[in-house]
Amino acid sequence: MSDSESWTSVLINGQLRKRLENHDTAKVTNLTNQTCIATNMPPKKSIVFEGKAGDNFGGINNGSKIVLNGDAGRFVGNGMNNGEIIVNGNCDEGTAHCMSNGKIVIQGSIDGDAGATMLGGELLVSGSIRGDLATCMQQGSIVVCGDILGDIGKMMEDGKIFIGGDFDENEHIEVKNISPSDWKK
């Protein structure tokens, strides 16, 4: 396909699936905000992306390792069942929405809500959350190194949240100061 032709999500994902039939790895460069990239990729594959991903990056991941070197839109890892997503950049709202297993690592901040209705898995954020965190969370673990600018744990049933930065305490959370030895319990 020539550079003048537009690479749509359907074309990119189709080419990825075709390559991953015979290979365990793939790399995609020059993403330009396409939505639904790397959704429902085959398990036990490794895919690296360069550029800016649109909404629903890595959605319904069933066991692939997906790395994005750039920013992502809304709902990174939406409905993720297994695997690992690493975003070396920032994301918009909805990260880890309805995630049931696996790991999402954001090497940046999330501009909006994160961890809503998480059913399991791990969300790690090196920056801040500029929205609510863990609304209706059922299970799983969330680690945020930066600040939380919204509510934490509204209607949360279970799971663990570790925050390194500042946040406003509210009636939805029980705050404990812990030492590194407490993490093993």
Image (cartoon, rainbow, N blue to C red):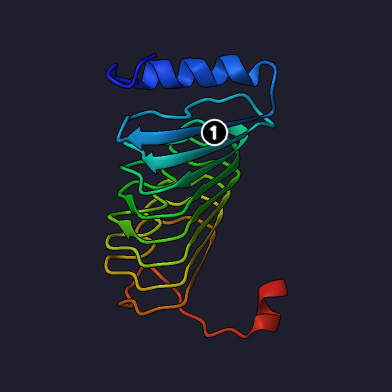
The residue lying at 67 percent from left, 80 percent from top is 182
State whether residue 21 is above or below residue 133: above
In this rendered view, identify the residue nearer to me: 6 or 47: 6
Q: Amino acid at mark 1?
A: Lys
* Badge 1: residue crowd in 10 Å (few <14, some 14–19, many ≥20): few
Q: Quadrant of the C terminus?
A: bottom right
Q: Quadrant of the N terminus?
A: top left
Quarter holding residue 133 = bottom left
The residue lying at 70 percent from left, 17 percent from top is 22
Per the image, the residue denoted by label 1 is 27
State whether residue 161 is above or below residue 135: below
State whether residue 12 is above or below residue 44: above
Horizontally, residue 103 falls left or right of residue 70, namely right
Quarter holding residue 167 = bottom left
Instruction: Give coordinates of residue 176: x percent, y percent.
Output: 51, 81
Instruction: Give coordinates of residue 150: x percent, y percent.
Output: 27, 65
Give the SS element for disc 1: strand
Task: Evaluate whether residue 185 shows in this view.
Answer: no
In this rendered view, identify the residue nearer to me: 22 or 84: 22
The residue lying at 53 percent from left, 21 percent from top is 16
Instruction: Give coordinates of residue 52: x percent, y percent.
Output: 34, 42
In this rendered view, identify the residue nearer to me: 82 or 155: 82
Instruction: Give coordinates of residue 155: x percent, y percent.
Output: 37, 55
Q: How many marks?
A: 1
The residue lying at 27 percent from left, 19 percent from top is 4
In this rendered view, identify the residue nearer to me: 83 or 35: 35
Task: Evaluate whether residue 71 shows in this view.
Answer: yes
State whether residue 184 is above or below residue 117: below
Horizontally, residue 137 falls left or right of residue 54, namely right
